Amino acid sequence: DIQMTQSPSSVSASVGARVTITCQASQGIGSWLAWYQQKPGKAPKLLIYDASSLQSGVPSRFSGSGSGTDFTLTISSLQPEDSATYYCQQANSFPLTFGGGSKVQIK
Amino acid sequence: EVQLVESGGGLVQPGGSLRLSCVASGFTFSSHEMNWVRQAPGKGLEWVAFISISGSIIYYADSVKDRFTISRDNAENSLYLQMHSLRAEDTAVYYCARLRAAGTRWFDPWGQGTLVTVSS
């Protein structure tokens, strides 16, 4: 199984700050990576797929990059509504696996 | 509007059984592969099961293999998860999730989830 390791597990930043979350796969997955946002009590929402493609309707301050084993989700200018937990997911092979999550809080 | 609505969750004793349902609307259900994903209280996301469009290809997480069965009824726009021999560690919110498009494995959208609690 492919293990996904996210860091940091939590981050606190001010409105307008740039926030970066990383995700590392235990083996190469090409660009088969997605990022999800989950707010408390809600279902996850797809933000980024194919490592860097922005899902329709997602604000452009979100971006993804990387390939192979190392990936990054960047929020270029943090907004209050971005307070949430973010998960990466590998889509290279079954079993599909998620990272442990990164909680983003507003200072 | 694309929508997935789960039902069937509840409290069940260890060793018991439960059947979850997910009704789809707003898209052509028979054209999309479907999945169940769960989330234990306060924990991360765990993929549970996948079913192809026709139902001929099915995959399970090792943690549920031989205990859970995924199925679908394309005529009823419905996805199911039959769960047997339930354990305390199966306690979670269970989400049904569509794969975004053929040949992809991104989950979009997700249902609102249904809570399964396994406890005596």
Image (cartoon, coloured by chain):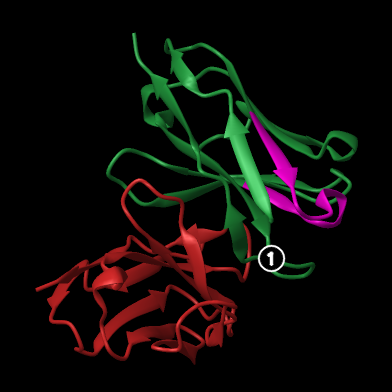
Residue appearing at x 81%, y 48% in the figure: B57
- Picture residue at 42% right of the left edge, 10% below the top: B13
Spot occupied by residue A12 in the image (x, y as percentages of width and height) = 13, 74
- What colour is chain B? green
Q: Is residue B52 magenta?
A: no
Occupied quadrant, residue A4: bottom left
Type of amino acid at the residue the image marks with label 1: Arg
- Please give the letter of the chain rendered in red: A
Location of residue A74 (image quadrant): bottom left
Where in the figure is residue B113, as x and y percent of width and height? Answer: 50, 39
Left or right of residue B61: residue A15: left
Q: Is residue A95 visible?
A: no
Few, some or many residues within 10 Å of mark 1 (<14, 14–19, 20+) = some
Q: Answer left or right for B53 relative to A26.
A: right
Q: Which residues are magenta?
A: B21-35
Quickly name the residue at label 1: B100
**Chain for numbered disc 1:** B
Q: Which residue occupies 31% across, 38% down? A: B41
Image vertical order of residue B93 relative to residue A4, above or below: above
